[in-house]
Amino acid sequence: MAESRRWTRRAFVEQSVGAAAVPFLAAAGAAAQQASSNPASNEPVGRKLRIGIVGLGNRGSWIADLFKQHPGYEIAAAVDYFEETANAVGDKLGVPAGRRFWGLSGYKRALDAGVDALVLEGIPYFYPEQAAAAIDAGCHVYMAKPFAIDVPAVFKMQALAKKATEKKLCFLVDYQLPTDPANQEVKKRVGEGALNGLAHIYSGGTCGPIPDPKPGPTIENLFRRAWYSHIALSGDLLLLYDIHIIDGVTWAIGQRAVAACGYSRIVRPEPHGDRTDCGGVVFQLADGTVWTHHNQLLENNAVMYNLAADLMGRQATAHLAYTGKVFVRGGPKHYSGAVSGSIYADGAKANIAEFYRCIIEGRFDNPTAHRSVDCHLTAILGREAAARKTWLTMDEVIKEAKTREVNLRGLKA
């Protein structure tokens, strides 16, 4: 049914409720293939890490509950812009009243309260500032994506990832698709020459509607999920939603785009935010490969790619996907495929477990953060080319270093 193709971030969570019954370490161990060479790494070694969760909305409170299920963590601080949210979720998590913080600087009070790590699940615009404070305080960082919304912020996060490594800190970005064994098998075969050279990539992201209210006297009312509709807060569709599959492609092929052209527009009636509703981008890779990507976020029962990609080679085609069957069709590395699991839930569990292992085992190379630079720059290039309806090179976008600013006037400190 077409209805099954309409997705929101809330819908992902609702679909994943059944997966919550899967034992945490079993799910995480199965998905985190990189840990399979060390069986003991699938089990915590006894040390509890004190974490502060920043951003306790729909996904943030769900992620907080997954951290609570893992035996290696203690939730030592609950942070949200809204006091009532910090208190309500803090109650559910068992966080003492004196360790619940709110306002824009709530994360600073969590750091002052003494935590080993910050978990960033709020508004992406604030991540670079929050992550920098955590690294300066000697804290590890776990974060959702996008982790930045413009070019200067991307490079700030790249510098923070390097600084984290130097300070022996973990800096992990929570991408779920690369934790899935079926998608890992496709990537492995592509790396072994399954395609006999790339020719064309086709990818897409389709999602359902999100709130788009008018801003009030301040932007405070946008902080309850409506930040999705403002590019300066969310990064627009390519970063907010499509980053899942854009990262999946860059993860699989090890390249970022070098140029792009495109077109995007707003079609919803009476828009209040500047977020686009639909568009398409044609990227060029350094080796000449054409990469066509489309996206939309509308209530129209569309049956199109929902976070999936076909890597089309000279001899075979590899299919990556967030849901459904993935495979390599044809060629010397044919793979009949497997249905990707409950990636949203199991992928998050795998990353939470991997974050713990990296800290305990002293692995601070932070590969997800460095890979994020390529997929975020690709997404920003596509966003800018589509918005301007022109051809842009990556070098031009990087040199321009365009920033997105947010008016914080009147907000609670």
Image (cartoon, grey):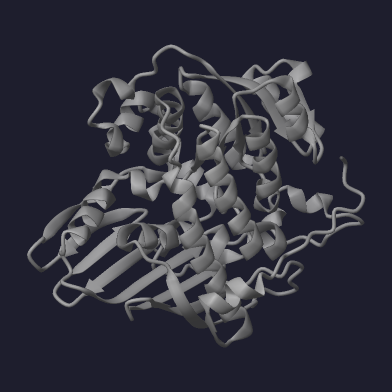
Q: What residue is shown at x 45% (from left), y 42% (from top)? A: 366
Q: Do we see residue 139 in this rendering?
A: yes
Q: Nearer the viewer, residue 9 or 4?
A: 9
Q: What residue is shown at x 53% (from left), y 74% (from top)? A: 382
Residue 385, relative to residue 343: is it above or below? below
Q: Nearer the viewer, residue 300 or 284?
A: 284
Q: Quadrant of the N terminus?
A: bottom left
Residue 188, relative to residue 383: is it above or below? above
Q: What residue is shown at x 50% (from left), y 58% (from top)? A: 373
Horizontally, residue 196 falls left or right of residue 19, namely: left
Q: Nearer the viewer, residue 221 or 245?
A: 245
Q: Position of residue 180 (x, y in %)?
A: 31, 45
Residue 64, relative to residue 368: is it above or below? above
Q: Position of residue 307 (x, y in %)?
A: 41, 61
Name the residue furthest left. 332
Q: Could you tell me how many numbered marks the image carries?
A: 0
Q: What residue is shown at x 20% (from left), y 73% (from top)? A: 197
Name the residue furthest bottom. 390
Q: Nearer the viewer, residue 363 or 256?
A: 363
Horizontally, residue 108 falls left or right of residue 367, namely: right
**What is the quadrant of residue 357 in the picture?**
top left
Name the residue furthest top. 46
Q: Position of residue 65 (x, y in %)?
A: 54, 28
**What is the quadrant of residue 39 in the picture?**
top left
Q: Do we see residue 87 in this rendering?
A: no
Q: Position of residue 389 (x, y in %)?
A: 59, 86
Q: Quadrant of the C terminus?
A: top right
Residue 31, relative to residue 280: is it above or below? above
